[in-house]
Image (spheres, coloured by chain):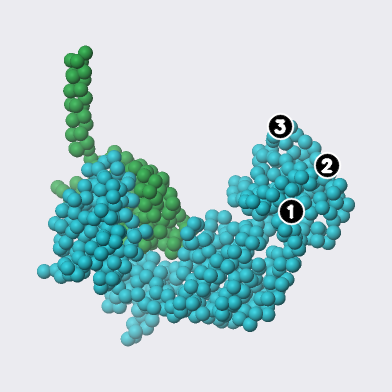
Chain colours: A cyan, B green
């Protein structure tokens, strides 16, 4: 006699499931499955009544496995696991069967087939539940310090925010000076204040803060470990240093695209990028009277499809500054679409038009053309709205280029085991719900490393990222899911295949009784299971997804 | 007029009956889909949230990552009579575990060659990258796969098991 006692709760989810699937029939069917001692159906299993019923039935029927057939584990697994825990049942003895999102909602027109599928899915769930084992989560101590990579406005803001909350911060900047891109800027939209008035005081506050250790001319060479216990190797001009931190914030920023070869940039002397124009504006402009700017140079093209996001505003800002400097100057902005979102940006754009700056829309099929040999003398542009070609006199051509990801983002992504987007910027865990967190626990992101941001956005993201980083540091420990791999030492042949495959360096070969054996650092294992799938001797199994459990599901389906 | 309507309704009824019978006898392939927790399983949920209908031939088995799928699981599924197996994970480059899907790709491609030698049609084992939000792709994949498998008929392994 098996001592497994399974209880099944089938949810109607109002009409969402009950309106398609014959829930009472499925429940009756569930009672016939092996080791099932109890089954009921609820209007809403997630309601207070449903939850208390789970708790009550666990003790009443001495259930030691619980299966809920309802919506999706993505939204409700924690709730039902907690209900099990509250009744004294290890939460890993719970199994979820998805009969709504993956059944009733997609087979509404075929209620009979949906009911049949629900029966199959529950049978598979029960087959797995019979083999589930209780698991214990380990508690890992968190070192109360943070590594911030990148000393621009985002990195410095994050560092200050953490340090002011009492945490030790290591701020690493690969350049000689803190400050990042802002050091090269003239003024900031929309207030048109000097960039140095923002960045210089920030640098001073960071440098003078007792809790912040600034490492300039330094690069991060290696990162090992996991949330709470990262071992970081810093490289300061060949001199190595090791530090231990609990969390990491990536604020490595981005760089401005140099449009070499485009519109004659590099060959003709009077062509600048917006960034180079900023420097000119800072030092004082010459006597140029006709200035043409071309937006979206190297952006929103097939090779680089994203929008630079802040470049329209940069162009408008610099156009305004030129006009304010010399009201007789003529400025044309050739654009493909203008991104001046929100309240302030749109107002700023309106003001620019009032000042007499001309905005002309061109299309990608007919890009502007340059006239002139050593210098640009005029720009030909097909005015889309007027439907005719215009020739604009030009003393200075300014190309608006987007921010692009640093080339070494790839190396950093590999070192930190975080993802990059298709464009080469860093990718957060969830576009909407986890905007400043990476999928790797304990690592956060802010500023232009994610995508081009302006200064206030970079600062708010820095505050958000540092606030997230504080959570595990303040709590002092983390408890990762117990879905990790384990080694059966009797079966292990010490071949080391798993060591090579593990993306988290969580496995190493250790000598034991004169034999080499794979050893998994549980805290470092993320539970991807690739080691288990590759192990030639079947010595590694993934808790909660053991071979027996998955094969039982397969076999329960095909009967 | 009445007579005409009556006869037509009888004919319709008969037709429907025939169609129903045909449907009952029509081959319904069984597909096992190994879906990764982070992308394909989520995409299957999104298909539900968006009410993208697809044939009820598929049963999902959730795994944490396609990289944990032992080729043995797929072999077992075919051995036990599955008509098709889908392995669905995150897009290359988007793997939650960095590179699990790349390992899955290598394993599935190698297994495909083996299955080919064993006489199993290529279409029966399919590998797809389905983004977490791409419910449309999940629904289309199942629809397309079920259609192809219906044309192919039952798995040759199943026939052998039965005889």
> Closest to the observer: A271 or A78?
A78
10 Å crowding of disc 1: few (<14), some (14-19), many (20+) = many
Q: Name the residue under label 3.
A: A387
**Residue A133 pos. (x, y %):** 26, 70
Question: For residue A75, what is the image quadrant?
Answer: bottom left
Question: For residue A388, what is the image quadrant?
Answer: top right
Q: Mark 2 lies on which chain?
A: A
Please report the residue visible at 35 percent of the width from the left and 75 percent of the height from the top.
Answer: A137
Q: Mark 2 points at which residue?
A: A393
The quarter of the rendered structure image containing the N terminus of chain A is bottom left
Please report the residue visible at 83 percent of the width from the left and 42 percent of the height from the top.
Answer: A393
**Residue A227 pos. (x, y %):** 47, 74
Side of A47 relative to A22 (left or right): right
Q: Residue furthest right?
A: A287
10 Å crowding of disc 3: few (<14), some (14-19), many (20+) = few
Q: How far apart are marks 3 and 1 (CA)?
A: 28 Å
Question: For residue B114, what is the image quadrant?
Answer: bottom left
Side of A513 relative to A558 (left or right): right
Q: Which residue lies furthest to the top in this view?
A: B1
Q: Name the residue under label 1.
A: A317
Q: Distance between the residues labelled 1 and 2?
A: 21 Å
Q: Which badge, 3 or 1, is on the more N-terminal residue?
A: 1
Q: Mark 1 lies on which chain?
A: A
Side of A415 relative to B48 (left or right): right
- Report if the CB atoms under discs 3 and 1 are less than 8 Å apart: no
Q: Which residue lies furthest to the left in this view?
A: A1
Q: Are marks 2 and 3 on the same chain?
A: yes
């Amino acid at each position: 006699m098996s001592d497994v006692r399974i209880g099944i709760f089938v949810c109607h989810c109002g009409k969402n499931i009950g309106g398609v699937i014959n829930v009472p029939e499925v429940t009756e069917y569930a009672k016939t499955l092996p080791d099932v001692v109890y089954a009921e159906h609820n209007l809403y299993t997630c309601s207070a009544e449903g939850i208390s019923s789970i708790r009550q039935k666990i003790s009443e029927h001495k259930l030691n496995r619980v299966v809920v057939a309802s919506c999706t584990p993505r939204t409700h697994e924690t709730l039902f696991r907690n209900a099990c825990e509250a009744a004294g049942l290890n939460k890993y003895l719970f199994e979820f069967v998805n009969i709504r999102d993956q059944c009733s909602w997609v087979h509404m027109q075929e209620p009979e087939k949906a009911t049949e599928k629900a029966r199959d899915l529950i049978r598979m769930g029960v087959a797995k539940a019979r083999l589930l084992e209780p698991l214990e989560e380990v508690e890992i101590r968190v070192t109360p310090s943070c590594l911030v990579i990148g000393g621009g406005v985002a990195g410095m803001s994050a560092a200050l925010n953490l340090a002011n909350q009492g945490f030790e911060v290591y701020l690493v900047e690969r350049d000689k000076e803190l400050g990042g891109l802002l050091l090269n800027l003239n003024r900031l939209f929309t207030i048109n204040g000097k960039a140095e008035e923002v960045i210089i005081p920030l640098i001073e506050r960071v440098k003078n803060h007792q809790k912040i250790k600034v490492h300039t001319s330094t690069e991060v060479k290696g990162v090992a470990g996991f949330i709470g216990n990262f071992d970081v190797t810093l490289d300061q001009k060949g001199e190595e240093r090791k530090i231990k931190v609990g969390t990491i914030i990536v604020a490595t920023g981005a760089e401005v695209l140099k449009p070499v070869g485009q519109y004659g940039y590099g060959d003709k002397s009077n062509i600048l990028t917006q960034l180079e124009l900023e420097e000119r504006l800072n030092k004082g402009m010459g006597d140029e009277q006709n200035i043409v700017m071309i937006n979206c140079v190297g952006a929103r093209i097939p090779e680089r499809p994203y929008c630079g996001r802040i470049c329209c505003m940069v162009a408008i800002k610099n156009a305004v500054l030129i006009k304010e400097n010399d009201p007789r100057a003529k400025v044309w902005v050739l654009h493909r679409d203008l991104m001046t979102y929100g309240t302030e940006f749109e107002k700023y754009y309106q003001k620019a038009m009032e000042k007499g700056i001309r905005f002309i829309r061109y299309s990608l099929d007919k890009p502007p053309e340059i006239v002139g040999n050593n210098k640009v003398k005029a720009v030909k542009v097909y005015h889309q709205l007027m439907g005719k070609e215009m020739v604009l006199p030009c003393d200075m051509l300014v190309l608006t280029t987007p921010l692009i990801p640093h080339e070494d983002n790839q190396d950093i992504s590999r070192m930190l085991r975080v993802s990059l987007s298709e464009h080469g910027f860093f990718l957060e865990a969830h576009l909407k719900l986890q905007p400043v967190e990476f999928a790797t626990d304990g690592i956060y992101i802010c500023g232009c490393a994610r995508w081009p941001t302006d200064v206030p956005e970079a600062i708010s993201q820095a505050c958000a990222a540092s606030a997230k980083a504080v959570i595990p540091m303040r709590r002092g420990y983390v408890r990762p899911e117990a879905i990790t791999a384990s080694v059966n030492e009797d079966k292990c042949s010490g071949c080391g295949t798993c060591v090579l495959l593990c993306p988290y360096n969580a496995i190493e070969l250790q000598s034991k009784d004169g034999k080499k054996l794979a050893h998994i650092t549980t805290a470092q294992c993320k539970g991807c299971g690739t080691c288990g799938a590759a192990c030639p001797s079947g010595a590694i199994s993934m808790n909660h997804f053991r071979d027996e459990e998955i094969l039982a599901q397969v076999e329960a389906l095909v009967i | 007029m009445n007579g005409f309507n009556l006869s037509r309704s009888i004919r319709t009824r008969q037709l429907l009956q025939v169609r129903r019978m045909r449907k009952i006898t029509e081959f319904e392939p069984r597909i096992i889909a190994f879906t990764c927790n982070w992308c394909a399983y989520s995409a299957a949920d999104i298909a539900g949230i968006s009410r993208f209908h697809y044939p009820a031939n598929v049963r999902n088995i959730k795994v944490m990552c396609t990289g944990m799928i032992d080729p043995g699981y797929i072999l077992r599924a075919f051995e036990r009579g599955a008509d098709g197996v889908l392995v669905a994970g995150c897009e290359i480059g988007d793997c939650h575990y960095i590179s699990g899907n790349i390992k899955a790709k290598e394993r599935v491609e190698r297994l495909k060659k083996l299955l080919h030698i064993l006489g199993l049609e290529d279409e029966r084992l399919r590998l797809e990258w389905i983004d977490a939000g791409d419910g449309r792709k999940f629904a289309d994949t199942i629809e397309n796969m079920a259609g192809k498998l219906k044309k192919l008929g039952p798995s040759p392994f199943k026939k052998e098991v039965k005889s």
